[in-house]
Image (spheres, rainbow, N blue to C red):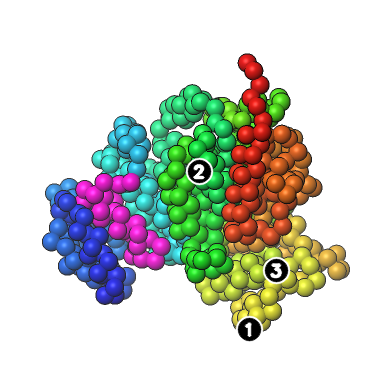
Amino acid sequence: MLDDNIKVQLQAYLEKVVQPIALVASLDDSDASREMGELIHEIAALSDKVSAREDGQFGRRPSFGVARVGEAPRIHFAGLPMGHEFTSLILALLQTGGHPPKVEPETLAQIRTLEGEFRFETFISLSCHNCPDVVQALNLMAVVNPAVSHVMIDGALFQDEVEKRQVMAVPNVFLNGQPFGQGRMELAGILTKTDPGASSRNAETISGKEPFDVLVIGAGPAGSAAAIYAARKGIRTGIVAERFGGQVLDTLAIENLISVKETEGPKLAAALEEHVRHYDVDVMSPQKVACLIPASQPGALAEVQLENGAVLKARVVILATGARWREMNVPGEREFLAKGVAYCPHCDGPLFKGKRVAVIGGGNSGVEAAIDLAGVTSHVTLLEFAPELRADNVLQAKLASLSNATVIKYAQTVEVTGTDKVDGLVYQDRASGEIHRLDLEGIFVQIGLSPNTDFVKETVDVTKGGEIAIDVRGQTSVHGVFAAGDCTTVPYKQIIVAMGEGAKASLSAFDYLIRTSAPAD
C-alpha cells in the first residue's frame, strides 16, 4: 500500500508517539478490506508503539479505528484515508499517541468542557481538498474529549448510504444522526455550533479589544499580505475573516506563483496563516463582518460590526474580502444547494458516479470540470450562454473527443427542478427562444466569481458588478478605508496580483496613518 519513501517519512512521524496505540479493523471479504488490512499492518510494522488487529466490531465495513491501547476507538476511518486524507491519518496517529496538537490552550479547554454526547460522521471524497480540515478538527475533538467520537466515511465506497442520506456534496457532517453542516469548516466554527455559549463569549472578548491601527477584513492572499506588511511596521494590527485562505482554499493546482514551482490551495492557505501568525497580528477567525461604519473624520476611529454582535475599532480598515462562486440566480439553485447543485467538481464529483450531470459555463473552468466529470459520470452536458465556448482550444478539443459529453451553446438556464433533490434543469435556446428540459441528478455551476462586498455597498463606491472602486494606492472613496485583491476593480484576478495589491494597500495605509493626526477627545 505504501511506497518506501512514504514509509520512511511515516516512521519518522511515529517516533513522536509516546503512548501505545492500536489500529482495530472491521473488515469483510472485499478488495477494499484487503487493502485496508495491508495498510494497518504496514503502519504497525513501522513502530513498536503501534499494533494492528482485525477483530473490530464497528458497523461499517471496511473501516478501522484508532485508539490508545486499552481504550475503545473514538476515531474511525470508513474507507482508505489516502490522497488528501493521508495527513488526517497521520495526525490521528500522533494525537492519539500523545503528541500535543498545535492548538491554542483556550481551544483545548473549550473542547474538554463540552457536555453531552457528540457522535460525528463526515462524508468525504478522497479528491476533496476541503474535507481534511473538517476531518482533522473532529478527530482532534475526539482525542481530547471522551464524549466525542468521529468517523470519516468515503462516499465513493459507501454509495448506498450516500443515496439513503442524500449526501450530494462534501464534506457533509452529521451529528448524532442529524445534519450538522456542509462545506469547509474550521475547528473554531465547529465549536461555536456545539457550544451554545461560545458565540456570546467570543463577542464579549472581541468587543473588549483595544482599537487597532490597521484592521484587515479578509485573510486570503491580499489580506494576509496586508496584515504582514502592517505588522512589520510595528503598529497594532488585526485581521478578521470567515476562513483563513479565502478562495485559495477552493483552488487545486497552483503553478503560476512565482518562485513556487507548484503547490495546492490548502497548502498555500496554511503557509499564509503561518506567516501571518509569525508576526504580532491579532487573528480573529472564523468571524463574519456585518457592516462597516467609517470614521467621522480623518484620524478618527472606524467601527467594524460582526454578525455575532461584537464591535471592533480601527484607525484604518483594509478591505480584502475576495470573491465567491458566482450564482446563476435562477429558481431552484439555492433551494437545491448541496442537494444536486454544486460548485466544486473536484470535491463533489465522486458522489455522482454513474449519474447524469450538467456543467454551466464554457470557460476554462467549465470545460475542465466537464472533462473531469466525464470520467466518473454516465454523461455530462455542458451549457454555454454565448454562441461559442470561451475555453482554450486544447480543452475544447479534449471535451469534443469524449463520447459521454455533450455541448449545448447559446443556452440560458432558467430553472433548476426537483423535489427533495435535483432532477433536472430547464434552459432556453437563445437563438430560437424554445424551452427545453434536461433530466439530471447534478448541476455544477462554473460561471466565474462575485466579489464579497455586500456589507460595504452602501459605504464605499462600488461598480455595477459589486467591485470596490480604488485608486492606484488602494484608497477607496472613504478616508481611512483601503481595499485590495479580488474584491476591487484591479484587473487580473490572480493570487500573485492580490498579494502585491495587499502589500500596496498596507503601505498606503501606513502612509495615511503617519500623515493623519488623531482628533482630540
Determine which residue is flagged by label 1. Answer: 401
Q: Secondary structure at mark 2?
A: loop
* Viewer-closest of 493 and 362: 493
Residue 230 visible somewhere in the drawing: yes
Secondary structure at badge 3 equals loop
Foreground mark, 3 or 2, reads 2
Disc on res. 106: none
The residue carrying pointer 3 sits among few (fewer than 14), some (14 to 19) or many (20 or more) residues within 10 Å by Cα, namely many
Pointer 3 or 2: first along the chain: 2
Q: Where is mark 2, residue-wise?
A: 232
* Crowdedness near tag 1: few (<14), some (14–19) or many (≥20) residues, C-alpha within 10 Å: few
Looking at the rendering, which quadrant does residue 359 occupy?
Answer: bottom right
Q: Nearer the viewer, residue 189 or 242?
A: 242
Q: Secondary structure at mark 1?
A: loop
Q: CA distance from mark 3 to mark 1?
A: 16 Å
User: In the rendered image, is residue 287 in sight?
Assistant: no
**Magenta segment range?**
73-102
Q: Residues within 10 Å of mark 2 (few under 14, many from 20)?
A: few
Q: Position of residue 167 (x, y in %)?
A: 49, 55
Residue type marked 2 = Arg
Location of the N terminus by quadrant is bottom left
Toward the viewer: 92 or 293? 293
Residue at point 70% right, 68% down? 362
Percent x, y of residue 162: 45, 58
**Residue that mark 3 sits on:** 362
Q: Are marks 1 and 2 in contact (CB under 8 Å)?
A: no
Q: Looking at the image, tell me whether mark 1 or mark 2 is earlier in sequence order.
A: 2
**Quadrant in the picture for the C terminus:** top right
Foreground mark, 1 or 2, reads: 2
Q: Which quadrant of the view contains residue 154?
A: bottom left
